[in-house]
Amino acid sequence: MATSLIILAAGKGTRMQSDLPKVLHKVAGAPLLIHAMSSAAALEPEKTVVVTGHSADLVEAAARGWSDAVDVVLQAEQLGTGHAVLQAKDALSGFDGDAIVLYGDTPFIRPETLEAMIDARAAHDIVVLGFEAADPGRYGRLVVEGDALQKIVEFKDADAQERAIPLCNSGVICAKADVLFDLLDAVGNDNAAGEYYLTDIVGIARGKGLSATVVRCDEAETMGINSRAELATAEATFQARARAEAMANGVTLHAPETVYFSHDTFIGADTVIEPNVVFAPGVTIENGAQIRAFSHLEGCHVSRGGVVGPYARLRPGTELAEDVKIGNFVEVKNAVLDTGAKVNHLSYIGDAHVGARSNIGAGTITCNYDGVFKHKTTIGRDVFVGSNTMLVAPVTLGDESMTATGTIVTRDVPEGDMAVARARQENKAGFARRMFEKLKAKRAKATKET
Ligand code: UD1
Ligand code: CA
């Protein structure tokens, strides 16, 4: 049966103390909302409906930025989770399959868990994701009898006996979409919070002879973010998981706790990662590369055998072919380096193409920006760029060409030629010695006088 998602993201998140809506705060470089949407994407949902409210325009833009196939509906007033889900009714009219309700502030639900819920749906009308909480606190409680879920009681409305139940509601619910909306039409707001509770559908369904059950997951999966402290905990949880996963996949981490991954980092086996490396979003590394200490990578691709760092910065649009070496204090942006190219020290390579096996000397800069426009530097194969060359783009160095150290290149260099553009050296015979003697005499006179 087809599946659709309803993602609740209307809340403000007052405890974040932020102008940004809660679901747009980031973990591992991606908004919480995107974590929720992408783990559920494994179900290949027919439709994804995001319910917005606070800062609706920002939340909508983030959702559409992730996939332009999402439906976005507005919940103008936040009257409760049941009311929020009802806002998706029109967007799902005519959809004849299961709907799964997820929260935009709950980033770690695993796809396998959602699949288990779908499986359980085959035998029950409603499936609720529950967990045994270490501290059940103010979570809604699941009242079960054997396999059957009888009802969900919100903490505020629960009696002492119900509050003693350790099994809690995660908020994730799965039911056939038309059944879900029919049940929600019957939900009122006569409760302690004066809200339309999504959770009430379970009791209503049971009263109508429908069945409900619970799928259980680990508490870590259902962690919702309500404060900056919880955001930091979520980040730590994500990083711990990403480090363990990388090592399980064959990546060596010399000091795992100092390496930071993004939600989409991909690293091949037999890659070695030294301490204090940050992978910002959009990085892919092929097998057998080496990322040395204190490097920062973002939006880039490193091929087999590549060596990056120590102290390197790869910015978006960097494409390194096999066996490329990027050394210390080198910044690369929007540049393609072909097989075996080397930029070993203290250089800036931006908006450029560097051909195979070319060597870029220390202190080389592609002067790519004229204050208004960006320009491209093209370097052929087997080129030797002398140290401290300024490449004033747009400019091209032909294959097997060369630049002399200290050259400012303002015109193209043909294949096989060498460019020299610097003042010719003159040696003044004995000048230095005479100068030193004069200065030392002056110093001797000055110390005597004081
Ligand atoms: C809810 C559940 C509770 C469960 C807990 C798990 C209900 C009534 N209660 O309680 O059983 O244990 O989650 O964390 O469902 N939202 C909207 N519009 C609204 C109200 C909420 O979009 O009108 C969104 C919020 O932004 C949030 C989510 O729904 O992402 C949950 O709402 P929240 O108010 O945090 O529910 P809880 O009281 O925590
Ligand atoms: Ca909550």
Image (cartoon, rainbow, N blue to C red):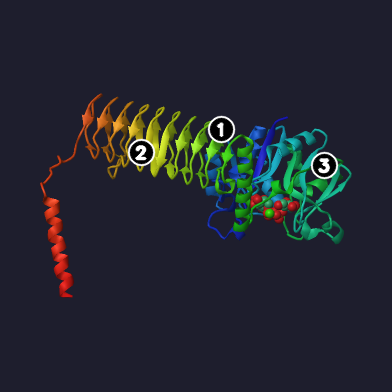
Q: Hey, what amino acid is under mark 3?
A: Thr
Tag 3–tag 1 contact (CB < 8 Å): no
Label of residue 350 in the image: 2
Q: Nearer the viewer, residue 110 or 292?
A: 292
Q: Which of the two discs, 3 and 1, labels the residue nearer the N terminus?
A: 3
Label of residue 213 in the image: 3
Q: Hey, what amino acid is under mark 2?
A: Gly
Q: Residue furthest bottom?
A: 450
Residue at (33%, 35%) from the top-left corner? Answer: 360
Per the image, label 1 sits on a secondary structure element best described as loop
Left or right, residue 295 beside residue 216: left
Q: Quadrant of residue 118?
A: top right
Q: Is residue 91 visible?
A: no
The residue where tag 1 is placed is 268
Query: CA separation, marks 1 and 2?
Result: 26 Å
Camera-near label (1 vs 2) is 1
Residue at (74%, 43%) from the top-left corner? Answer: 173
| Residue 398 image position (x, y, % from top left) | 27, 26
